[in-house]
Amino acid sequence: MTEITVGNLKGGVGKTTTAVLTALGLAAEAEAGDSDDKTLLVSADPQQSALKWAHVAGEDWPWDRVNVVAWTDHRTLGRQIESARGEYAHIVVDTPPSRTRVTRASLEAKTLEAALTATGNLIVTTSPSAIDLAEIADTFEVAEAVDAIRPVYTSVLVVRVLWSTKSATEAPAVLVEDFGYPVMQSRISAREPIAQAFGTAPALTGPFAGYADALTEIHARHDQQEA
Ligand SMILES: Nc1ncnc2c1ncn2[C@@H]1O[C@H](COP(=O)(O)OP(=O)(O)OP(=O)(O)O)[C@@H](O)[C@H]1O
Ligand SMILES: [Mg+2]
């Protein structure tokens, strides 16, 4: 059972791409292991980007293994996730960016809060650029508030990494040392095929292999938590 919320109140930092590819990776693992495990991908953003992604993919989308729903009401999101547990082995929630100046009271923050309360796991995606790192604290504040009530395991996945750039090398260190945030070992490169992946259902190989690594890391962490 893997339950993951992908979140960052900053917009355009790879949340939907990560949620979709992670859900597809979980489905591919089930297929490879000849298992009937189903994955639920929850589009909890008002744009319903993940749902649109799957619809555009149409017959290419593995509907028998990954169902996609739009649950955007923060008041019912938690209950809907709970009720999905019987049917789905894995649940991945894509959450919205904040459209206003980030406050804990914004609807988007409440959606993130509801998703975290239900799943207990947060992957914060961010690019390594200073402008994105500068805003990451707002998301951690929401996670910490939920964590005070129920444990939330939070880690950062650095995406859109241009290798051998200063920001790529320094970003993880900044996150760990300046903020004290756990950063995943896996990194997602900035790649044109990832930028163009909307509406497709790619295998996590070649340019997408970073997401397969991230999934391996997620499973390993999950096993540790269980132990
Ligand atoms: N690894 C990558 N390499 C290149 N482009 C990427 C990568 N990951 C995401 N992108 C691109 O970055 C943009 C933002 O990605 P995405 O929509 O997944 O972010 P988001 O955080 O869900 O945005 P929003 O806050 O608007 O919901 C998109 O154009 C996407 O194609
Ligand atoms: Mg999105």
Image (cartoon, rainbow, N blue to C red):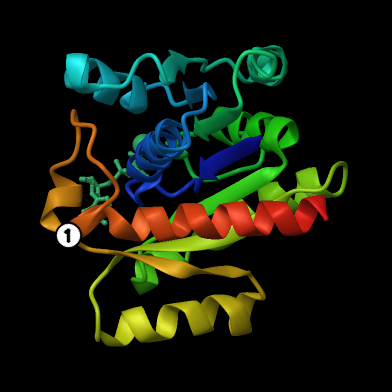
Instruction: Classify residue 93 as left or right of residue 48.
Output: right
Whether residue 152 is situated above or below residue 41 in the rendered picture: below
In the rendered image, the residue lying farthest to the right is 149
Give me the residue at 66% from left, 41% from top: 104
Give me the residue at 17% from left, 48% from top: 195
Q: Choose top left, top right, bottom left or bottom right for residue 28.
A: top left
Give the quarter of the figure containing the N terminus: top right
Whether residue 187 is situated above or below residue 221 in the rendered picture: below
Where is residue 48? Give x, y as percent.
Answer: 36, 21
Where is residue 191? Give x, y as percent.
Answer: 17, 59
Where is residue 210? Give x, y as percent.
Answer: 34, 60
Give the quarter of the figure containing the C terminus: bottom right
Question: Does mark 1's beta carbon lie closer than 8 Å to ligand 1?
Answer: yes
Whether residue 126 is situated above or below residue 25 in the rendered picture: below
Instruction: Classify residue 211 as left or right of residue 9.
Output: left
Residue 40 visible to an observer of this rendering: yes
Where is residue 22? Give x, y as percent.
Answer: 42, 42
Q: How packed is label 1: few (under 14 Cα within 10 Å), some, or many (20 or more)?
A: some
Identify residue for label 1. Answer: 191
Q: What element carries label 1?
A: loop
Instruction: Classify residue 144 as left or right of residue 178.
Output: right
Instruction: Classify residue 159 as left or right of residue 125.
Output: left
Which of the two residues, 114 or 56, is positioned nearer the viewer here? 56
Amino acid carrying mark 1 in the image: Arg
Whether residue 129 is situated above or below residue 125 in the rendered picture: below
Residue 138 visible to an observer of this rendering: no
Q: Choose top left, top right, bottom left or bottom right for residue 79.
A: top right
Give me the residue at 36% from left, 52% from top: 13
Which of the two residues, 196 or 226, is positioned nearer the viewer here? 226
